[in-house]
Image: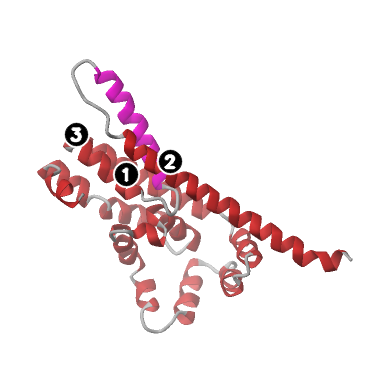
Amino acid sequence: MPEAQLPTTIRWGAIAKVVCLIALLIAANILARDYMEVLHFPIRPGNEDAVHRTIMVSATLYALLLAVPFVPGAEIGVGLLVMLGPPIALLVYLCTVIGLSLSFVLGRLIPLSVLVRFTKDIKLERTSNLLKAIEPLSKKQRLSYLTEKAPKRFMPLLLRYRYLALAVALNIPGNYLIGGGGGIALFAGVSRLYSVPGYLITIVLSVAPVPLAVLLFGTGFLSAQS
């Protein structure tokens, strides 16, 4: 009898995990939406302290939301830049690097065995088998294995130039559809294909253009896009 009930138990457990994950993502997106509305606060003589506190809280919240997969964190950063201009550019840049680093570190800390069980629970058998196969491999062996198993047209090239592919993915408009900055960084950490120094250099360079442009030329081009 227990054996007969086991599949049902697994199925409901998998459903509960997926529902919880979706609920967390929805909550994060609602928080991001409300956060964007809060950004439109008045700046006038006499409320400098309140503005400073709001900016620091907003920057911290931005870094945390950016680390969450499928949350449009880049849009929040752009909102801060449009609202406050060049003086906030360096802070937004630093928070962007911090947020993407948090996701990457979290991905590195997640044991692949946990992902193997999770993907198996939700019936992603091929993904589960792939993760199980690469789990014991070193980074070099893992890269070789994935290159061999990947579709021959594009994936080997993307794996070979994975740092460039990461930089491009982080700067694609609407990348929240493929996980956003947080999801992309999380996957980079989970994959164990990126060294920590190589990843940090990539994000430090790849997220710099917009804040640097705002710092040098103002927010005119951002206002035109929004």
Instruction: Name the quadrant containing residue 154.
Output: bottom left
Q: Nearer the viewer, mark 1 or mark 3?
A: 1
Q: Secondary structure at mark 3?
A: helix
Label 1's element? helix
Query: Residue lying furthest right in this view?
Result: 1
User: Mark 1 or mark 2: which comes first in sequence?
Assistant: 2
Residues in magenta, as a range: 47-66
Question: How many residues crowd mark 2 within 10 Å: few (<14), some (14–19), many (20+)?
Answer: some
Q: Residue at x 49, y 80 (%)?
A: 149
Would residue 63 be counted in the magenta stretch? yes
The Cα atoms of the two marked residues, 1 and 2, are separated by: 11 Å
Q: Which residue is mark 2?
A: 31
Residue drawn 47% across the image and 81% down it:
148
User: Type of residue at label 2?
Assistant: Leu
Label 1 sits on what residue type?
A: Ile
Q: Residue furthest top?
A: 46
How many numbered marks appear? Answer: 3
Reading the image, the residue beneath label 3 is 87
What whole-number distance in Å separates the C-alpha atoms at marks 1 and 3? 16 Å
Task: Give the left or right position of residue 122, taking residue 185 as reference.
Answer: right
**Residue to which mark 1 is pinned:** 76
* SS at badge 2: helix
Residue 179 position in % (x across, y down):
42, 58
Image position, residue 83 (x, y; %): 22, 37
* Depth order, front residue of 208/202: 208
The kind of residue on which mark 3 rests is: Pro
